[in-house]
Amino acid sequence: MFNKHFRKYIFKYSIPLLIGIAVLVFIDYVQTNVPIIIGDIINILDKFDKSEVTEIFAKDELLNLTVSLITVVAITGIGRVFWRLAIFGTSRKIEYGLRNEMFIHATTLSQDYYNEQKVGGLMTYFINDLAAVRMAYGPGIMMLIDSTFLGGFVFYKMFKLNKELTLILIVPIVLLLVAMVIINKSMRKQFKIRQEKFRDLSDYTQENLSGISIVKAYVREAFEIMTFKRKSKELYDTNMKFYKKSVLVEVVTSIIINLIVITIIGFGAYAVVKTANLPDAEKFDVGNFTAYIALFFMLSWPTRALTRVLSIYSQAGASAQRITDFLETKPSVYDKDNLIEPDLFIPEIEVKNLTFRYPDSNFNAIDNMSFKINQGEMVGILGKTGSGKTTLVDLMLRVYNVKHDKILISKTDIMKLPLKVVRDKIGYVPQDNFLFSDTIKNNIAFSNSSLTMEEVIDASKLADIYDNVTEFQLGFETILGERGVTVSGGQKQRISIARAIAKNPEILILDDAVSAVDTKTEETIIKNLYDLRKGKTTIFIAHRISTVQNLDKIIVIDEGKVVAIGSHDELLETSEFYRDIVKRQTLEKLAEEVK
């Protein structure tokens, strides 16, 4: 709870936090005067009934005590508002700062981290775990300070009223605190299990809701419901174990407190009778007895608060550890020393004897690949599914690290180029055509929110999506569903292409980005790109001949290797592998036309 990730926020907001704590301690001291004042009022009334004081004296004393009581209550009320704003406000600021830091850190993590982690599990860090930490820095600190100081002040005043009785009460209270510490260790372990079960359920729910169309298409609703119920039952059982221990703490606390109350009543009544004939200074009279009982009930709050504090900190400790692990996860892809930022960026790519293998694989995804793409060329990279096309794109974007001098962009080793430069100069249209749940305009202008509406429209026309967008009731202000589910596959592809065109990058890579559109639309998009991107480099990753046949150069790859390079006509003459692909796709097209 106080490691470097959290400590900096505590220091940052230490002044309002310390002021809030100081006010809380002051209010704790002030409010312990309430039982004493009430006891004095009872004593005055008791003496007046026995004719031991005059009516004038009684009225004056009662008036003074009443004013004192009202003053104490008013100060307590105002102080409680102040320390709540200071302490709870600080906890909210700490939560706000941590959440922003976590999101910033999340954007720096490499793709391999997200390949291993699920979205639902990561969301628990930002919601449940952060909430647990906030509770520790807000209500947790308040209860800890309040129970410590209020308990101390109350014990002091109880001791002044009756030493013998207070010493007797220390034993059961100490035993109670020891029991709570023992139970706390078990609760912390149980809370960690509980968070893991919640993460599993969140992962499962998120995946099913995202893939609901697949679930329905395969009529798997009943199976998924049963699996959800099983995971939900596991979370329920874990929660019940945790709450049973929490209830056990409450029950043990209540039993011990009730036993203490019985002890106070018994010994207190005996002390009142025993000291009845002693001088006033030595008496334990009815007013003192009332004040003592009221003080003890004030002490019951700190005792119960400590049990709550243990529960809060057992949860927060487990959550803080999870957040710390997340924040200390290092990205595998990052800017290293000796970076070179070219004065003039040349959209030229050269690959030299590139070999790459995924960390969890025994086979090379890219095997000794070499080729060069010159500035201004429109190049196709053609290959079967699984031939290494997307892997090659990921390496060009530095999603993964490569060895030095294996990929050169702008005549510079990609490992020496700043990540920002590489990704800023390259526009990318991925296979999944991910769209945000936002307006079509904002999706197209994603690279630069200051783009004008005219620029957005121009990009949509070049991507041949403008006519489709204008058919929507709200046009470019139409809000897309999650991941763009409210538009067709072809429309998603063209909006993604428009987004890349609007960025106007030096190098544009389209990874199978026109596979969901018809050949006429495909030809229109390629023609528009030819006219638009003079002097800039464009790369089409494809498995369809129609996508690449009219491009300047085609790089044919298979099983991670370059098997041929040339124009469409050149490859028809020199590459049997390319001719075979053309033949197969021609036959497939004829078969579809016959159907």
Image (cartoon, grey):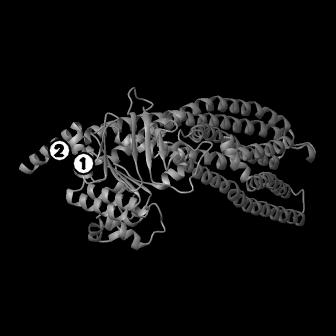
The amino acid on which the numbered mark 2 sits, given as a three-letter code, is Gln
Q: Is residue 256 above or below residue 543?
A: above
Q: Residue furthest top?
A: 362
Q: Give how far apart the Cα atoms at labels 2 and 1 are.
A: 14 Å
Q: Where residue 493 sits in the image (x, y, percent)?
A: 31, 56
Nearer the observer, 278 or 388: 388
Q: Quadrant of residue 203?
A: top left
Residue at 28 percent across and 41 percent down: it is: 383
Tell me the element at label 2. Answer: helix
Q: Which residue is mark 1?
A: 568
Left or right: 225, with 357 as reference point:
left
Residue most toward the bottom? 454
Marker disc for residue 585:
2
Q: For residue 158, what is the image quadrant?
A: top right
- Horizontal and vertical percent position of residue 579: 19, 41
Foreground: disc 2 or disc 1: 1
Labels 2 and 1: the sequence-earlier one: 1
Q: Quadrant of the N terminus?
A: top right
Q: Quadrant of residue 74?
A: bottom right
User: Is residue 252 in sight in this rendering?
Assistant: yes
Which residue is pictured at 21% across the width and 44% down the height? 572
Q: Amino acid at mark 1?
A: His
Q: Is residue 476 left or right of residue 310?
A: left
Q: Residue at x 38, y 28 (%)?
A: 363
Residue placed farthest to the left in the image? 594
Kindly state the secondary structure of the residue where label 1 is placed: helix
Left or right? Give the position of 255 relative to 367: right
Given residues 295 and 481, the one toward you in this image is 481
Q: Is residue 160 above or below residue 529?
A: above
Q: How many marks?
A: 2
Q: Nearer the viewer, residue 461 or 477?
A: 461
- Estimate how packed mark 1 is, as few (under 14), some (14 to 19) or many (20 or more) residues with alpha carbons within 10 Å: some
